[in-house]
Structures are given as structure tokens and as C-alpha cells.
Amino acid sequence: MAEYEKKVREILKAHKCIFIRRGKGDHDIWYSPVTSRHVTVDTRIKSRHTANAILKQCGIKHKF
């Protein structure tokens, strides 16, 4: 299985999303200026579907 965590974080940073804090368990909280929302990002993303859902919540049009 592919690891998408690093790729997703790079895409979030490229779109000026801001890391806010560590969440519960193995999750992080990010802020997306595109959608003006806080988004929960898993630190162990193994599914491309999960990676695409996170990017969609942030308003980023990118598909794995």
C-alpha cells in the first residue's frame, strides 16, 4: 500500500493551509483558507480515497 501522508501534507502546504495543532490519537488539525474550515488529517493515510477526501474538504482539486 502507498503512504499518502507526506504527499497530502506537501499539497496542503503548497495551497497555504496552516497546521493548527495535534488532535486526538493520530490526527492533526489543519486550517484551509480556501474553504475557511478546520480539517482533520490522519497521520497514517493508506488509502487514496481518504487522501482525496481530505483534499476535497480543503477545497483543493487534486486526485491521486
Image: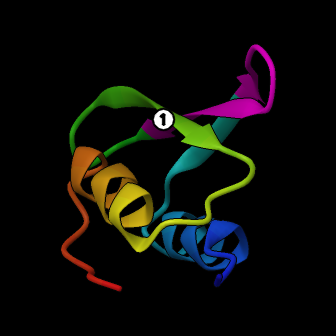
As for residue 5 lying within the magenta part, the answer is no
Q: Is residue 35 left or right of residue 14?
A: left
Q: Quadrant of the N terminus?
A: bottom right
Q: Image height check: is 3 above or below 29?
A: below
Q: Is residue 15 above or below residue 40?
A: below
Q: Secondary structure at mark 1?
A: strand
Q: Residue at x 67, y 66 (%)?
A: 5
Image quarter hosting the C terminus: bottom left
* Badge count: 1
Q: Position of residue 37 (x, y in %)?
A: 32, 27
Q: Which residues are magenta?
A: 21-31
Residue 9 pos. (x, y %): 63, 65
Q: Within 10 angstroms of label 1, few (less than 14), some, or many (20 or more) residues? A: some
- Name the spot of residue 21 as percent of width and height, x first: 76, 25
Q: Which residue is mark 1?
A: 31
- Asked whether residue 25 is drawn in magenta, I would say yes
What residue lies at 23% left-to-right and 56% top-to-bottom?
A: 56
Asked where in the image residue 32 lies, by quadrant, the reply is top left
Q: Quadrant of residue 51?
A: bottom left
> Would you identify the image quadrant in which residue 38 lies?
top left
User: What secondary structure is the stretch in magenta mostly built from?
Assistant: strand
| Kind of residue indicated by mark 1 | Tyr
Left or right of 56, for residue 6: right
